[in-house]
Image: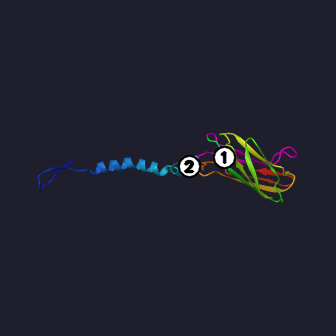
């Protein structure tokens, strides 16, 4: 739209209210998209997706109780990923073995261990940590995972447990 200046008789272009509203309407989706961007993408962290750790009761006299750690379907679990296992109900949670990958098992105390991956677990693959503790005694084991700096896991399950009585075992 053009507007005539009454003092100088010059014609000046002006913005109509509708033009301003159209521009504002188009900017709202752009602003909403920027707000919806995940924090991980903004921070530059690598998203490992839905990796998970699960408790396992094992098989009495054959396979000890413990945990399985499975990498997400599209990204490997990196070297330096840790699993901290804390037990209760017993004085010693036993020796832990590692199958399906390589990891260092550190004894923190009689009732706690820290397992650190020394090689990556490929996408979709599983590594297992089993104790010599028998499910015929009462105990509880809780495991929590920690990722190295620069990694996050959207939809992951970072904790698990195994609980045994003298007659029943349950795992999450």
Specify whether 6 is left or right of 59: left
Which picture quadrant has residue 121?
top right
Q: Which segment did they paint magenta?
A: 47-74
User: Is there a contact, CB below 8 Å, between mark 2 and mark 1?
Assistant: no
Percent across and percent down for residue 61 are 88, 46
For residue 57, above or below residue 139: above
Number of numbered discs visible in the structure rendering = 2
Residue 3 drawn at (x, y percent): 18, 51
Q: Is residue 87 visible?
A: no
Look at mark 2 in the image and give the residue it sits on: 45
Way the structure is coloured? rainbow
Q: Name the side, left or right, on which 60 lies relative to 143.
A: right
First in residue order: circle 2 vs circle 1: 2
For the point 86% across and 43% down, which residue is it? 62
Foreground pick, 84 / 80: 80
Q: Position of residue 22 (x, y in %)?
A: 33, 47
Label 1, residues with CA under 10 Å away: few <14, some 14-19, many ≥20: some
Secondary element type, mark 1:
loop
- Tag 2's secondary structure? loop
The CA distance from mark 2 to mark 1 is 15 Å
Q: Which residue lies at the image location 38% right of the left edge and 49% below the top edge?
A: 27
Expressed as whole percent of the image width and height from the top left, the position of residue 131 reads 81, 50
Q: Which mark is residue 79?
A: 1
The stretch drawn in magenta includes residue 62: yes
Residue at 33% x, 50% y is 21
Disc 2 or disc 1, which is closer to the eye?
Answer: 1
- Please tell me the numbered disc located at residue 132: none
Is 21 left or right of 66, judged from the image as shown? left
Q: Magenta span has 44?
A: no
Q: Main secondary structure of the magenta part?
A: loop
Q: Badge 2: how crowded within 10 Å, few (<14), some, or many (20+)?
A: some
- Camera sees residue 44: yes
């Amino acid at each position: 739209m053009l507007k005539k200046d009454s003092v100088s008789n010059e014609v000046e272009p002006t913005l109509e209210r509708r033009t301003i509203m159209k521009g504002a309407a188009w900017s709202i989706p752009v602003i909403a998209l920027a707000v919806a961007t995940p924090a991980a993408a903004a921070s530059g962290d690598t998203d490992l997706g839905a990796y998970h750790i699960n408790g396992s009761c094992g098989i009495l006299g054959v396979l000890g109780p413990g945990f399985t750690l499975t990498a997400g379907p599209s990204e490997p679990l990196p070297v330096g990923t840790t699993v901290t296992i804390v037990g209760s109900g017993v004085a010693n949670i036993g020796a832990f073995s590692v199958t399906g990958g390589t990891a260092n098992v550190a004894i923190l105390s009689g009732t706690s261990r820290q397992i650190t991956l020394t090689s990556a677990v490929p996408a979709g693959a599983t590594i297992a940590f089993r104790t010599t503790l028998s499910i015929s005694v009462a105990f509880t084991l809780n495991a929590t995972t920690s990722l190295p700096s620069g990694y996050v896991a959207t939809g992951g399950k970072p904790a698990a447990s195994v609980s045994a009585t003298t007659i029943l075992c349950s795992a999450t």
